[in-house]
């Protein structure tokens, strides 16, 4: 796409040049820091990485960031205010608010003095890498927790300032372009959902009906199982497995996490995720043993550990005893299906609204399971693995396309808000499609 006819040198790090008609302005000359408190009846706001300023949300019945019980020190945010997460602005947790509400006193709230900016252009600009890098340079401290913005440095962050009419055109152009890209991404997301549903359907069909077609079926008497092959048996967990708990008693072991993609070793040195001060109270997990997060049947999961290590004492570790009649990989699919289809959920106890809906040990040990002959269990595992490999290959391809679209979106915004692309003459029809006056082609294809 075409560039501006004349450029000049830029003082902004990582931006070599800007259009000759654009200006640069320091935050201290365009914004005032405000701290307007005692507005406890206003709605709560948050600032999230890659999302900007959003309405305060809850997740699984729990607040994402629990607010203080006393909201009197929370700051009023007006529409158009620039808000920065003091500890995460260096990563891009900043944005221009579309809402009026209140936010933590730990955040910076900046208000325009003379309406230099169209708020939508400013929102694109401040979340761009060239500005986020300056927020990082304005921060002090080590690590993701201790690192905070130092206000005297923040005041000297340099912003780009195009003429107002160009800001308006940039917003129209980027809104149209990004909406097209976002629609494509949403289409891929739906396709991923369908593929994930297919993966679950494959597992469900194989572990409940088998992979030997045309066999006689019988009624199991179990809701989630329905009819199953007549030569299979119906059993319970306690007939083949036992629960164990062996506390480590000291630190120094690999810490294992139960994730949707398997049991993983946690990097406790990264200071990321949920960490404990002391792991001596954690329980051992040996290679080949099962570990499940039975405390939260909505977001928890189960895995078969390939490692020796320790995991939370709140989790359930259990062992396969009957190796003569049971294949561990087959029963891993059976147990994971209990999460995927929320079969375990109806046996739960606790407070689901607070994310604590657990599966009691008695209910788990009494859980009905299908028991095919072990050779057939192994055939089922091979069939599932083959099907999953094909589906996973398709999923990886789609995820790659989505990553390319996101990279394209990021690069497009960066080039337009820094003046590396001239969109002043781009026509933006009401349909949201963009074409360039020079060649009439869709601007999204450039």
Image: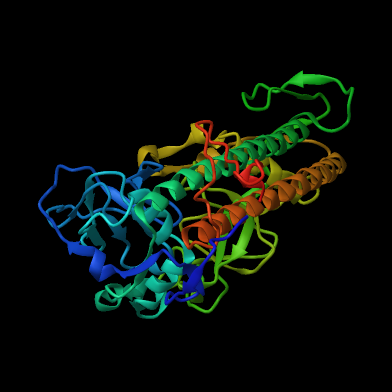
In this view, 79 is above or below 306: above
* Residue 40 place in picture, x, y as percent: 14, 47
* Residue 357 place in picture, x, y as percent: 43, 41
Task: Judge by depth and name the residue closer to the eye, 181 or 240.
Answer: 181
Residue in view at x 29 percent, y 53 percent: 66
Task: Judge by depth and name the residue closer to the eye, 119 or 34.
Answer: 119
Figure quadrant of the N terminus: bottom right
In this view, 271 is above or below 398: below
- Residue at the limit of the structure toward the left, as seen here: 38
Residue in view at x 85 percent, y 20 percent: 216
Residue 188 seen anywhere in this rendered image of the structure: yes
In this view, 220 is above or below 35: above
* Residue 100 place in picture, x, y as percent: 23, 44
Residue in view at x 58 percent, y 55 percent: 259
Apparent side of residue 265 relative to residue 393 in the rendered image (left or right): left
Q: How many marks?
A: 0
In which quarter of the view is residue 275 placed?
Answer: bottom left
Residue in view at x 70 percent, y 23 percent: 220
Apparent side of residue 315 relative to residue 367 in the rendered image (left or right): left
Task: Judge by depth and name the residue closer to the eye, 89 or 433.
Answer: 433
Q: How is the image coloured?
A: rainbow
In which quarter of the view is residue 150 placed?
Answer: bottom left
Residue 318 seen anywhere in this rendered image of the structure: no
Task: Judge by depth and name the residue closer to the eye, 222 or 235.
Answer: 222
């Amino acid at each position: 796409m075409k560039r501006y006819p004349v450029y000049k040198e830029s003082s902004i790090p990582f931006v070599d040049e800007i259009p000759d008609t654009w200006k640069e302005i320091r935050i201290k000359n365009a914004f005032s820091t405000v701290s307007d408190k005692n507005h406890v009846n206003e709605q709560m706001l948050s600032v999230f990485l890659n999302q900007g300023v959003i309405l305060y949300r809850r997740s699984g019945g729990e607040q994402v960031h629990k607010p203080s019980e006393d909201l009197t020190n929370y700051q009023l945010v007006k529409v158009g205010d620039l808000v920065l997460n003091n500890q995460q602005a260096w990563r891009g947790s900043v944005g221009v608010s579309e809402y009026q509400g209140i936010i933590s006193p730990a955040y910076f709230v900046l208000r325009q003095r003379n309406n230099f900016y169209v708020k939508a252009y400013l929102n694109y600009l401040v979340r761009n890498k060239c500005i986020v890098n300056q927020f990082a340079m304005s921060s002090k401290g080590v690590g993701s927790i201790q690192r905070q913005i130092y206000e005297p440095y923040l005041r000297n962050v340099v912003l780009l300032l195009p003429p107002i009419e160009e800001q308006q055109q940039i917003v129209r152009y980027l809104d149209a372009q990004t909406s097209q890209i976002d629609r494509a991404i949403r289409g891929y997301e739906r396709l991923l959902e369908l593929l994930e549903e297919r993966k679950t359907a494959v597992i469900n069909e194989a572990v409940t009906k088998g992979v030997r077609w045309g066999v006689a079926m019988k009624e199991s008497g179990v809701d989630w199982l329905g009819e199953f092959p007549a030569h299979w048996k119906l059993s319970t967990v306690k007939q083949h497995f036992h629960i164990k708990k062996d506390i480590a008693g000291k630190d120094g072991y690999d810490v294992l996490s139960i994730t949707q993609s398997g049991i993983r070793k946690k990097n406790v040195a990264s200071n990321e995720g949920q960490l404990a001060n002391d792991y001596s109270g954690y329980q051992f997990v040996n290679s080949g043993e099962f570990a499940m997060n039975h405390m939260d049947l909505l977001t928890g999961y189960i895995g078969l550990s390939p490692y020796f290590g320790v995991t939370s004492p709140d989790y359930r570790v259990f062992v396969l005893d009957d190796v003569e009649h049971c294949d561990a990989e087959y029963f891993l699919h059976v147990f994971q299906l209990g999460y995927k289809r929320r079969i375990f959920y109806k046996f739960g106890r606790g407070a689901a609204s607070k994310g604590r809906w657990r599966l009691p040990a008695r209910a788990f040990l009494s859980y009905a399971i299908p028991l095919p002959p072990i050779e057939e269990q192994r055939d089922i595992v091979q069939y599932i693995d083959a099907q999953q490999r094909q589906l996973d290959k398709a999923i990886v391809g789609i995820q790659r396309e989505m990553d390319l679209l996101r990279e394209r979106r990021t690069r497009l915004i960066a080039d337009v808000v820094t003046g590396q692309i001239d969109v002043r003459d781009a026509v933006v029809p009401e349909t949201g499609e963009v074409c360039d006056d020079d060649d009439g082609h869709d601007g999204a294809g450039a």
